[in-house]
Amino acid sequence: MIPPMRKWMLAVGGLVVGLGIAEGVCRLTVAYPAMSTLWAGGSTWRVRGLIADPDVEFSFEPGYSDRMSVPGDYDIAFSISPQGLRDDRTYAPEHPGTTRILLVGDSFVFGVGVELQDTLGRQLERDLNEDGAHGRPVEVVAVGVPGYGLDAYATLIERWVPRLHPDLIVVALFTGNDLMNYDVKRRDPRQVIEGTFVSRSKAWSWNLRKYSALASALLKRWNPYPAEAPETAASRDPESMLPTMLPWIERIAAPARSGGPPVSVLVIHGRETVLSWRDEHQPQAVRDQQARFLKRMNETLDEFTRRGASVFNPQEAWVSAPPPPTRYFLKIDAHLSAEGDGLMAGYLATQLRQHLGAALAGAPERTSQPPR
């Protein structure tokens, strides 16, 4: 007869061996890649070096340095300045004799996949300083963090305008995930864990899933934290998204309406949108989908215009750019390449000279709206 203690030891040992075998099987099948996405995305760099920020959920840790990498696409070192920006400069509040532009955005402003000198902000700065037409040097302060949206842009403007006293504000509005319903964030808030941001539906099991493919497989679809708010019509119906954006649009445009620096919006179009414009053989269903999307986007842009912001939509620049259009985007990642950033910087520099020349010369004033 087997003693009770030995029975327990055999049972525990059997359980451990069984779990070990199951773990090995999972690591050889589809479960392990699912777990590894906690650390790295398949088609874009997984952002690291973040800290919790009570105003905008998360921001970069000052002084952090690392590499952003997607195999087969890019592997680039980057550093975060003491001010929390991807920059190699520190900016004082006063900037006598220099026109300062505050460029606000997400990963497109941060410059995912490109060197610092090739980012949108640095190329815009070079373009505006090339001809010296306005008699004042221009510096561009890029304030961008991957994962930000309209709500974060409003907060960034309110944070940085008193600190840096810019003469112009430019918001780079990505027509993809910036045009979203903010109920999504409220239903599944994100938090920073070990320098990366994670939705709450994954955060509770982070350590288990980080080390165990079996745990990742078992917990992938189970979440003990239900949505904080029920799904609404706005969550399902794209036409209902605009009302959720209006408070943020109001705050973004506020400086232009209160005598502060002029506010401009540069529309950043995604790769699929640009390719659809350049391909005359798109199926009708795709064309119809794009038409609905552009209608929704233009309704959003009209709200910025009504609040005194200038809107620069580079659709024509994309259509007329030298082929092939894929050269303007990274090979795997959907972000702009150095050449794509250069195209947008050149377009924006031209628009700013034409419509906001007085502000570039150091005398901000309300100007006429550019055509869209």
Image (tube, rainbow, N blue to C red):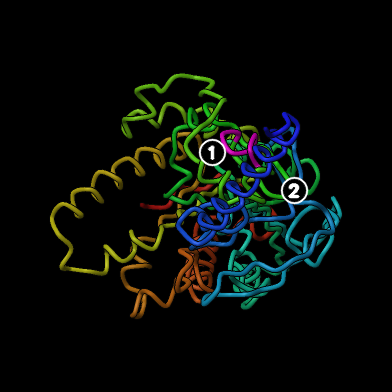
Mark drawn on residue 194? 2
For the residues marked 2 and 1, what is the alpha-carbon distance in whole angstroms? 20 Å
Give the main secondary structure, helix, strand or loop, of the magenta stretch: helix
Mark drawn on residue 283? none
| Residue 169 in magenta stretch | no
Say which residue appears at 44% left-offset and 19% top-offset: 230
Q: Position of residue 220 (x, y in %)?
A: 50, 41
Q: Position of residue 370 (x, y in %)?
A: 42, 52
- Name the mark nearer the viewer: 2 or 1: 1
How crowded is the residue under tag 2: few (<14 C-alpha within 10 Å), some, or many (20+)?
few
Left or right placement of residue 241 versus residue 172 in this view: left
For the residue pair 307 and 330, the one nearer the viewer reads as 330
Say which residue appears at 26% left-offset and 69% top-offset: 278
Q: Position of residue 60 (x, y in %)?
A: 74, 51
Say which residue appears at 47% left-offset and 39% top-offset: 304
Say which residue appears at 65% left-offset and 52% top-offset: 145
- Amino acid carrying label 1: it is Leu
Residue 13, above or below 82: above
Residue under pointer 1? 219
| Residue 201 in magenta stretch | yes
Quadrant position of the N terminus in the picture = top right
Please report the bounds of the magenta region as a residue range.
200-206
Q: Are marks 2 and 1 in contact (CB under 8 Å)?
A: no
- Amino acid carrying label 2: it is Glu
Marks 2 and 1, the one that precedes in the sequence: 2
For the residue pair 319 and 329, the one nearer the viewer reads as 329
| Quadrant of the image occupied by residue 202 | top right
